[in-house]
Structure formats: C-alpha cells, structure tokens
Amino acid sequence: MSVTPMIHPDVREAIARLFDLAQSDTGQARRVADFLLAWWNAEELGGFDIANLFSLDHAIAADMATVFAFLGSRPDAIYADAFGRGDEMQKLIALWRPQVLTRDAAEDG
C-alpha cells in the first residue's frame, strides 16, 4: 500500500535525501543508515543512538527530525515501503547489516 500522495512533499524530500545519503560513502552515511534501519526494524537491525545527532550536519539532523515528527503524528505505523522505498531498504540492509542477510539465509537453508 502506498500512501505517498497523502504525504507532505517536505517529508518525501527528507526521506529521499536520507536514503541517498545512507547509500553513499560519506562519514555520516552510517549514522543515517542506522536511523533508517531502526525505523524499518530496530529489533533485528539495531537502534539509533540519539547522540549521533551531534555528529551530523544540521540539515541532515533536520531531515531526521522531519521524518520523526511525521511518524509521531501518524495514528498508525508507517514504514519506508509506503514511500516506495522497500527495495532501497533491502539494499541498505545488504550494505550496512550483511550479517542479518547471512543469518536469515542460514536459517532458511
């Protein structure tokens, strides 16, 4: 189910920037990936240390705050796949949490 048309453009743009950054090789990419992966499944993929905000550029922290505020305002849970980002999330898992994929493959095999 896609709810993208009902979502404010600022939220969509913040999410797009965060996904782009998380897939890059910058020093802040891991922190952004941690944020996105915690949104997807913190129990399996790890949480986000709020103190990491201190190590981010203000614009990146603002994008995270935009997403966080949006998620907090929702009456129901909404995940990245609702924004058409499910495949990108799988790429982030492969990039930043390959051990999860290895473990899942071993359990399935």
Image (cartoon, rainbow, N blue to C red):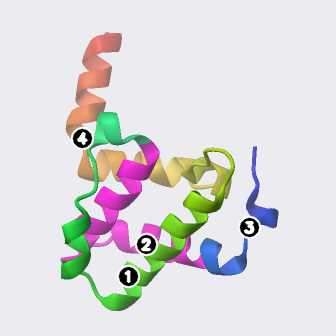
Q: What label sits on residue 64 in the rendered view?
A: 2
* Secondary structure predominantly adopted by residues drawn in magenta: helix
Which structural element holds mark 2?
helix
Q: Which residue is mark 4?
A: 98
Give, as a three-letter code, the residue at label 1: Ile
Quadrant location of residue 52? bottom left
Q: Is 33 a magenta residue?
A: yes
Query: Which contiguous range is marked in magenta?
Result: 13-40
Which structural element holds mark 1?
helix
Q: What label sits on residue 7 in the rendered view?
A: 3
Quadrant location of residue 13? bottom right
- Mark 1 → mark 2, Cα distance in angstroms: 6 Å
Q: Position of residue 45 (x, y in %)?
A: 30, 41
Report how many numbered discs are placed on residues in the image.
4
- Give the foreground label among 4 and 2: 2
* Dots 3, 4 in contact, CB < 8 A: no
- Mark 3 → mark 4, Cα distance in angstroms: 31 Å
- Give the foreground label among 1 and 4: 1
- Give the foreground label among 3 and 4: 3
Which residue is rendered at x = 45% and y = 46% of the image? 40
Give, as a three-letter code, the residue at label 2: Met
> Which of the two labelled residues, at mark 2 and mark 3, occupies the earlier sequence position?
3
- Mark 1 → mark 4, Cα distance in angstroms: 25 Å
From the viewer's perspective, is 21 left or right of 79? Answer: left
> Which of the two labelled residues, at mark 1 and mark 3, occupies the earlier sequence position?
3
- Mark 1 → mark 3, Cα distance in angstroms: 19 Å
- Mark 2 → mark 3, Cα distance in angstroms: 16 Å
Which structural element holds mark 4?
helix
* Dots 1, 3 in contact, CB < 8 A: no
- Mark 4 → mark 2, Cα distance in angstroms: 24 Å
* Dots 1, 4 in contact, CB < 8 A: no
Q: Is 47 a magenta residue?
A: no
